[in-house]
Amino acid sequence: MDGIVPGALVELQVGTAVTSAVVASGGHTFTVPPLVPGEIVRARQDDGSGFTPFSDTVTVEDAFVPPQAEPTLPEEINVCSQCVLVTHATPGALVEVFAEGAQVGAAFANRHGTVCVGVDLTELHGKPGTKLQARQVVCGAAGPFAERTLIAQEGMPKPVVGSPVFGCQSVVPVTNARAGALLRFESDSGDSLGQLCSCWTSVNVRVIRALVTGEHVRAQSFYDRDPCVATGLWSDWRLVEQPDDRIKPEIREVVYEGDQTIRVSNQIQGATLTVLIADVSGDMPEEFGPRPVGAEEEISLGAELKTGNEIVVVQRLCGVSVASDPVVVALLPPEVLAPVLIPPMFHCGNAVQVSNLHPGALVRVFMDGVPVGVRWAGLNHSIPVPVSPHLAAGRKVTATQTLGGKESLPSEPVEVQELGRLQRPRIIGPVADGDREIWVSGVMPGARVSIRSGGILQNPRILIGEMDAAEPVVRVPIDGIAGAQPLLAAVPQVRFCGRTATGDEEPVILSPLAIPGNIEVVEEEIDFGNFNLPASAGGFSMQLRGHLYRRKAEGHAPLVVIAHGFHSGFNTTTGDPIDSAAGYGYLARHLVKWGMTVFSVDLQPVNDALVSFSDPPLSHRARAEAIFRSIALLQVHPLSEPVTDASRIGLVGHSMGAEAVAFAQVMNADEGRGISILGVVSIAPTNWIPDFVYPAGKYMELFGAIDQLTGSIPPAGQAGPYGGLRLYDRAEREKTFFWLHGMRHNPFNSEWVGAGDFAEEHLADISRSEGEHQRAAKFLVNAFFQDALMGRPQYGGYMHGIVFPHALAGLPIHTSHSEPGVVVIDNFGDKDDQAGLAAETPSDRAANSLAQVNDAAGGALAEWSDQPLTDLDNAPHESFGTRLAWDGPDARFAATLNGLAFGADKVLSLRLAQFYEDSDRNAAATPTDMFVSLEDGNQTATLRLGCVSTVPFPDASSRVNTTLRSVRLPFDAFSAANPALDRNALQRVTLRFDAKPKGHILGDDFEIGD
């Protein structure tokens, strides 16, 4: 029970029975006789001023008696553990733990079916190999046992006390603790702050007194029972800070009319909360509270909210009060839709994915009508819901959602299946050092997924992460490995009903943003003298110079040439000259440390000679000729020859230079120049030559979503600076495109922002920092060249757009990718020489590129049409696509495949975008979602698109574009969703639009590839 005023008399009413107690803290657990289904439970308190009204009533619901499912034990339990975490028990059940037939601990499960059970294993004498068992007892009836083998874990990790820690706070956050060990805390004032046994590696621990601003606290893991007595290192001291704006609470949206509960995050234990509710914004609010912070986010209001009410929550800690942002109560939708569940569900399943949700819904999951899971949706349209107890074969699972007290109809039921052959999971690479999560595919829904360390130094393998999977593709949070040993590889494992399956090791690579050792970079200017360009490139003479970046130690290395774009060459504020070629030093130095030699060529003479843009193709040819000449001279110059491998060359261009480097590769191929260019990168390219096609090879493009060049888009087939994305659309494979939200044009060159930030001053306040631009460029360009030039194909995995390293956390990056050898299901009418497809004239929505039938149907289908993307003001692409919109769950699109056969190593790639502007169907800043099914004529396997990638809403006002991105769905995930699917006889791929109540999308390039 939460929300109690310390010292209050609390009265609990169960049916007609009343129990009371004076409660010293903000929460309390009452022990009562066994509850009876249908009984009403409610409570009230008296802090000396009289009893409050009763809380919202809770109805006691049914449970499975006897329980058919065992609870869940952790994947690893140390033989020295003094407490053990047990999950997936029936809420309120008695959980009993046994070892060698003797009961060693017992406790009651909380409302989430979880309990940390204190255990006494001293009789085992610290010997591993013993079986530990746990079961649940419901209404006196015991269920089956879960079982784990106890292991010996070496060493004791050094805990980390989290930050910030505030004065008057009554909990201390700790990470890197040993699960099952005791944690003790002390202050530098000399007193103990208490101890407890933690079942978790990361935990918030309530200490025995409020913390004092200015003191320092620390923590230590230890065992105190023979023969396992052991003490770890103390954590570093953590300063207790004065509370400030960081204690600002947040009201979780959406809040609807009729709601009697709000949810508030960033509650600080030891603080009080006051809720202010105004009839409408601007009115004097009514004040409720203060009340102490509770253990849960929910705050019961005791009365229904009205549409238009404005809510503010004030948190007060140590005399400092900070108010939340106001939240206005929303109008209920006209209909609360039934949620959608996707089969299959398997016996022993731990979690269920629930979709087609209204944001702000309270979601409940039932098995044969008995509640087994509850979770709030937040702003999501699809969520995993943990279930307690586990799913049981033969029973039927349903779900409901409730908004403002209005409950939906139940979903269509899904019958739980017996578990067949357990599929081996697969890590989706790359995995880089410092990552905090690992992607795993091929997971049978409901399984427990764990990640262990691998590699020759890791024996035995160490558990570094685990979670319950509701879908076939999951991201498993991981901890670092305690001690000095590096993580060399990661190994996935799934557990179902006591059975396990282990996947292959995935080697861990160095993050492309890391610094590989202490490598000294030498920077030198090289002046090659005058260079006379041919008449085809302008016929003028230019001084050819630039900046060479190389390792101090000699040795031939791949050569990367960087070409800048158009700039006046002067600081627009001071009039001083600038050196655009020096603006990529941050990137050049990074590439050198990773094994490359870099030359940034000065193309200002080209800018000066062709400033009028009277013949833009001439400008690009001139830039290309300067690049070619630089490559030739670098092979013989005494400073560069010893460090240049001319058989491995890469090009990077920015702005007009970005188009120029792509055009240079066209000239290289068409004119037989014979230059060994193995990869080309275009950063924020222009589109002054709309008729050239980048030839087959490795090509990558980066574009900021709020780049000044996205402000206006030229008509199809016409030149102009604003259609640079179309270089990717026209390019042959292998090609990759990164659409970078919050990023723009100038910050990729460190000279340009400081020289006046030409044409983008007005975007500075809404864009990401210069450092974030450069971090993205260093990561993406280096990863690309590690694959293209250095022969390290694992880095090419970043081009697929599913996995990004932890070092880029928080940077929204959306990818398009296509490689040679794809099978094109439908490109909706575009010419594709590589795939042998002629242009459709006119395009036909009902026929796909396999010469098979497309179909869209359903009563909620609002739009299905062929869509030339160049006809849309906010679509920057030069392509044909399809346009689909829906207003309810009864809508779908299908493409006939006619018996195609593919292995488990393939992916289904769909290039999709939210249609802008349709504010009714596409809510601002909200990703869209759908289901994708593969069918063989008898069996269907379905994935939720959002389990792999989102289809993002356009980035920012004034730079809002309907920009396509690839979502790549692994075939082994479809096989995990339905092991009976025959991948050798695929008949249809179907997009089902019942994962989100409404939506409007563009689609293009439906392909099957590697």
Image (tube, rainbow, N blue to C red):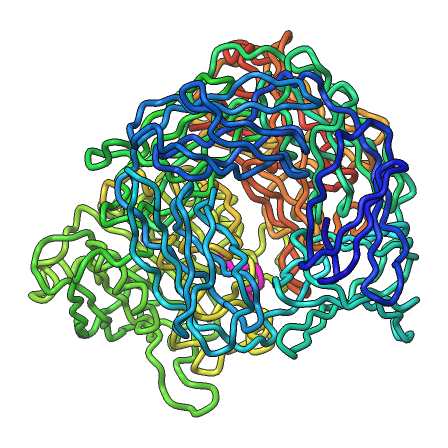
In the image, 891 versus 375, the foreground residue is: 375
The residue at the point 76 percent across, 32 percent down is 33
* Principal secondary structure, stretch drawn in magenta: loop
Magenta stretch holds residue 113 = no
Image coords of residue 183 (percent x, y): 42, 52
Relative height, residue 59 to residue 224 (above, below): above
Can residue 96 be seen at all in this image of the molecule?
yes
The answer to whether one can see residue 861 in this image is: no
- Which span of residues is magenta-colored? 703-707
* Image: 311 above or below 448: below
Q: Residue furthest top?
A: 938
1004 or 52, which is in the foreground?
Answer: 52
Residue 489 position within the rendered picture, expressed as x and y whole percent measured from the top left: 29, 37
Please name the residue shown 73% across and 52% down the image: 298
Residue 857 percent across, percent down from the top left: 79, 24
Position of 504 with respect to 811 (left or right) is left
Kindly identify the residue that appears in the image at 82 percent across and 25 percent down.
858
Q: Nearer the viewer, residue 693 or 353?
A: 353
